[in-house]
Image (tube, rainbow, N blue to C red):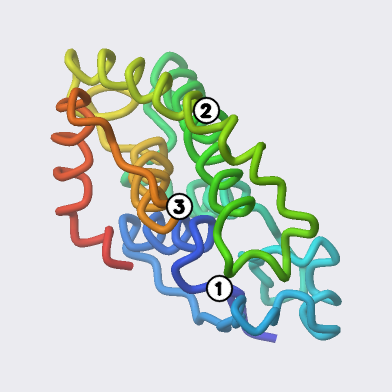
Amino acid sequence: MPMKLYDGGRAPNPRRVRVFLAEKGISVPLEPVDLGALGQKSEAYTAVNPLQRVPALVLDDGTVITESIAICRYFEALQPDPPLFGRGALGMAQTEMWNRRLELHLMFPISHVFRNSHPAMAKTEIPQVPAWAEANKPRIEEFLGIFDRELANRPFAAGDQYSVADITGMIAIDFMKPAKLAVPEACQNVRRWHAEVSARPSASA
């Protein structure tokens, strides 16, 4: 079977892969999964990924790779240029560090707010825990303050080069809108960085 990527529209993790592929100039056939209709829970998709999460990459031989960063690493190894996981030992470590920080301290807490407060998630997040949504809001603001101070000294999330960490961070910031959150006015470095990475053609993928 030909390679295909099971996609989930504007959901953050599928979008991370699409932006990464756009930066690489790689085209992969997409198979849409309608998350609004709970397509990820269908019998057909569960056979592809029992965790019922998108994205999922199916290779020509039927091998399935799930998890957005694992999929990105697969394509990075196939096509190293431009390098999006850093250059050299230090660059790779710094990119890994900031990608994980942006996942753990920004994307995931924003997701907790969205999943536990947005009415559209009531049928998939059972039970919704509004108190958990509220508990994550100050954590998000605290991390944005830390990130803002870091961005005072460099143009990109992990250093002088655009990387997968910028993709994760950009999409996390974009995810704040449906979660009814906003970047604090004081975080001007974050706002500047987000505007610049969002202006890249890949951001519309």
The disc, 2 or 3, on the residue closer to the chain's N-terminal end is: 2
Residue drawn where x is 49% and y is 32% of the image: 137
For disc 3, the marked residue is: 179
Q: Nearer the viewer, residue 143 or 22?
A: 143
Looking at the rendered image, the quarter that the C terminus falls into is bottom left
Q: What element carries label 3?
A: loop
Q: Position of residue 130 (x, y in %)?
A: 64, 45
Label 2 or label 3, whichever lies nearer to me, is: 3
For disc 2, the marked residue is: 105
Residue drawn where x is 28% and y is 36% of the image: 183
Q: Where is residue 37 in the image (x, y as percent from the top left)?
A: 65, 84
Q: Are marks 2 and 1 in contact (CB under 8 Å)?
A: no
Distance in Å between CA atoms under marks 2 and 1: 25 Å
Residue 106's mark?
Answer: none
Q: Are marks 1 and 3 in contact (CB under 8 Å)?
A: no
Corner quadrant of residue 58 = bottom right
Corner quadrant of residue 193 = top left
Q: Where is residue 64 in the image (x, y as percent from the top left)?
A: 75, 66
Q: Which of 129 and 96 is in front in this view?
A: 129
For disc 1, the marked residue is: 7
Residue drawn where x is 53% and y is 56% of the image: 13
The disc, 2 or 1, on the residue closer to the chain's N-terminal end is: 1
Q: In this view, does 195 lie above or below 48?
A: above
Residue drawn where x is 50% and y is 81% of the image: 29
Specify the amino acid type for callout 3: Ala
Q: Position of residue 132 (x, y in %)?
A: 66, 37
Q: Is mark 2 on a helix, strand or loop?
A: helix
Looking at the rendered image, the quarter that the N terminus falls into is bottom right
Distance in Å between CA atoms under marks 2 and 3: 15 Å
